[in-house]
Amino acid sequence: MYLGIVTGTVVATTKASGLEGRTLLLVQPVDDTRAPNGDLQVAVDVAQAGVGDLVTLVGSREAALALDPWFVPVDAAIVGIVDHIHNPGRAPR
């Protein structure tokens, strides 16, 4: 599980079976201080996130398991919207 910030939406006129009706969002992975941590990626949204939201994502097989039916071809899935991060060992940016 990792953090990301939703930066935009992705429109696909044709989707793989099992992804019909699902929202695809563009996400910037970040660390706990919200600093970018990796390349932009497309994630399927199961938490109803919006642009600017800090979200939790799962990747690989866990991303496919976040959907019904299981094992659809996805590499990342948004599974939660983060309200607050408390890490007393690090100051936020």
Image (cartoon, grey):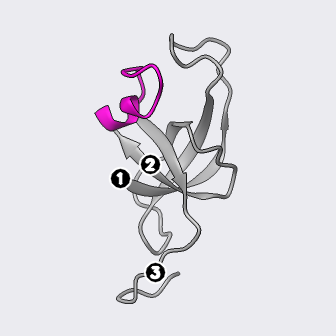
Q: Residue 64 in magenta?
A: yes
Q: CA distance from mark 3 to mark 1?
A: 17 Å
Q: Which residue ends up furthest to the front in the rendered image? A: 68
Q: Crowding near pointer 1: few (<14 within 10 Å), some, many (20+)?
A: few
Sequence-wise, which precedes: disc 2 or disc 3?
2
In the displayed structure, does residue 60 sit left or right of residue 18?
left
Q: Residue 4 in magenta?
A: no
Magenta region: 61-75
Residue at 68% across, 14% down? 13
Amino acid type at circle 3 is His
Q: CA distance from mark 2 to mark 3?
A: 18 Å
Mark 3 secondary-structure assignment: loop
Residue at 42% across, 20% down? 72
Amino acid type at circle 2 is Leu
Label annotation for residue 57? 2
Q: Position of residue 31 (x, y in %)?
A: 41, 67
The residue to which callout 3 is attached is 86
Residue nearest the observer in this picture, 38 or 2: 2
Q: Crowding near pointer 3: few (<14 within 10 Å), some, many (20+)?
A: few
Marks 2/1 in contact by CB < 8 Å: the verdict is yes
Q: CA distance from mark 2 to mark 1?
A: 6 Å
Mark 1 secondary-structure assignment: loop
Q: Which residue ends up furthest to the left in the rendered image? A: 61
Count of numbered labels shown in the rendering: 3
- Examine the rendering and report whether any part of residue 4 can be seen: yes
The residue to which callout 1 is attached is 1
